[in-house]
Image (cartoon, rainbow, N blue to C red):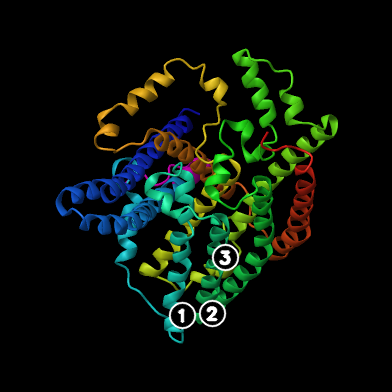
Amino acid sequence: MISNGAEIGKLTLLSVVWLTIVFTAVWMATWAVGILLPMLLQNGLGEKAMLINEILRFVTPVVSILVFIPINAMFMVLIERRALALFTVRKGPNIVGPDGYLQTAADAVKLLFKEDITPIGADAVMFTLAPIVFFAPSIFGAVPLLAAVTNNHALFQVLNLPTGIFYVLAAASVPVVALVMAGWSSNNKYSLVGGLRSAAQAISYEIPLVLSIITICVLAGTLDLVKITEQQAGGILNWNLLGGGALSGIDKYLAAMVSGQPVGSILQASYPFSALSAVATGALICCTIISFWLYLTGACAEINRIPFDLPEAESELVSGYNTEYSGIKFAIFFLAEFTNLFVVSSIATVMFLGGGDNPIPVWILDKLPLLPQLVQALRDSFLVQTLHLINPETLFSTLWVILKVYSLVFFAILIRGTLPRFRIDQLMDFGWKRLIPLSLIVFVIVVFARGLVNCHG
């Protein structure tokens, strides 16, 4: 027990150190390109600086993504290996660097220097394009999420698309094409079976995944990720996870009661149909919790995480679609898999868990001592007023996003260490006979229940 407790402490410290490194590096690169460089150019170039600033405005999000993806993937690989070791009472990688902190960096260097082999009889062009096509949506698909998870920061407002979630889902459907390309072009029967399995799996599980997202869009009345996040502001009672804001009336009632204001007509105004409205509210809460579970299940299947890793299935297919890949091409597949896990966790955070919203209701936050003074002191600091290095609202929003997203990542790792792999027939039956009918039922109930409840008060 003592040893296990020590390993939990080491895992926690490793996570804090690596996350600090990851997000400090990303923000410093973003600040340098998006804020510092325009400030310097404004003094030196005059009118020409306007054109360069416009270019930098579009370059900044790309820089942040390109810096973030490789460092974050190294962290996620390391945290998964250490967490799985903890679940199975082992130590995990702890030799390279202090307590193994640099293990994945060493693995990345090793992969980059390995020989890149193209099998005899393979389609060289398709074989080379497959990892690129697989990795590209990880970069472009996450673009609209940046505005939502940073509280619509000025540096990322250019990414705020009116149909942001539609764009994300469209990009998320591309990687399966790459897996089929990889399987077919490898000239390997195991790779081909893995590619075909990935196509069948994607067709089966993309339907409940998309329906669960559409359910939330119906509740929010928009496809704009920033607006969906803003509608969930004010604490956990307003999150989509709890009925798409169906409890916002209760939140207003509690806020008025704590502040000593009249509370007589608040519930009647929020739930005008009394008993029928209460039933509809309960139905919305249950349906959105089920939608959350449907999304997590479909997302695990879409990114081929255990127990849905049939396209790889080492015990049956060696390594499935990437059996013949080595060196940097294999590294790209590996990088994209962990980036996809981060992206689907970010989507879940934005759509269901309030994005960067503090889960503590505002009427409780206002009663906390010293918090307003600390926030004001941060706003008045040199870092904010002169260097514009920190935006307090964005900082707190980002911290909550980090906590929520990596909690979901850790949950996915826990599932990997707990559940066995499905058989292919079980996988297909579970998708077509259970998840798809359930997602359709939930969607229909939400459409009717939403009309009986004023979801946003």
Q: Residue at x 45, y 61 (%)?
A: 140
Cβ–Cβ under 8 Å for marks 2 and 1: yes
Q: Secondary structure at mark 1?
A: helix
Residue where numbered disc 3 is placed? 173
Can residue 185 be seen from the camera position used here?
yes
From the viewer's perspective, is the residue at label 1 or at label 3 nearer? 3
Q: What is the x, y in percent for residue 214?
A: 66, 54
Q: Hey, what amino acid is under mark 3?
A: Ser
Q: Hey, what amino acid is under mark 2?
A: Trp
Q: Is residue 383 above or below residue 447?
A: above
Q: State which region is magenta.
A: 82-95
Left/right placement of residue 454 relative to residue 26 reads right
Q: Hey, what amino acid is under mark 1?
A: Met
Left/right placement of residue 365 relative to residue 156 reads right
Pick the front one: 196 or 420: 196
What residue occupies the far right of the structure in this picture? 275
Left/right placement of residue 215 relative to residue 191 reads right
Q: Residues within 10 Å of mark 1 (few under 14, many from 20)?
A: some
Pick the front one: 184 or 37: 37
Q: Secondary structure at mark 2?
A: helix
Report the disc number at residue 126.
Answer: 1
Query: What is the distance, in whole Å, between disc 2 and disc 1 at their CAs?
Result: 9 Å
Q: What is the x, y in percent for residue 377?
A: 33, 23
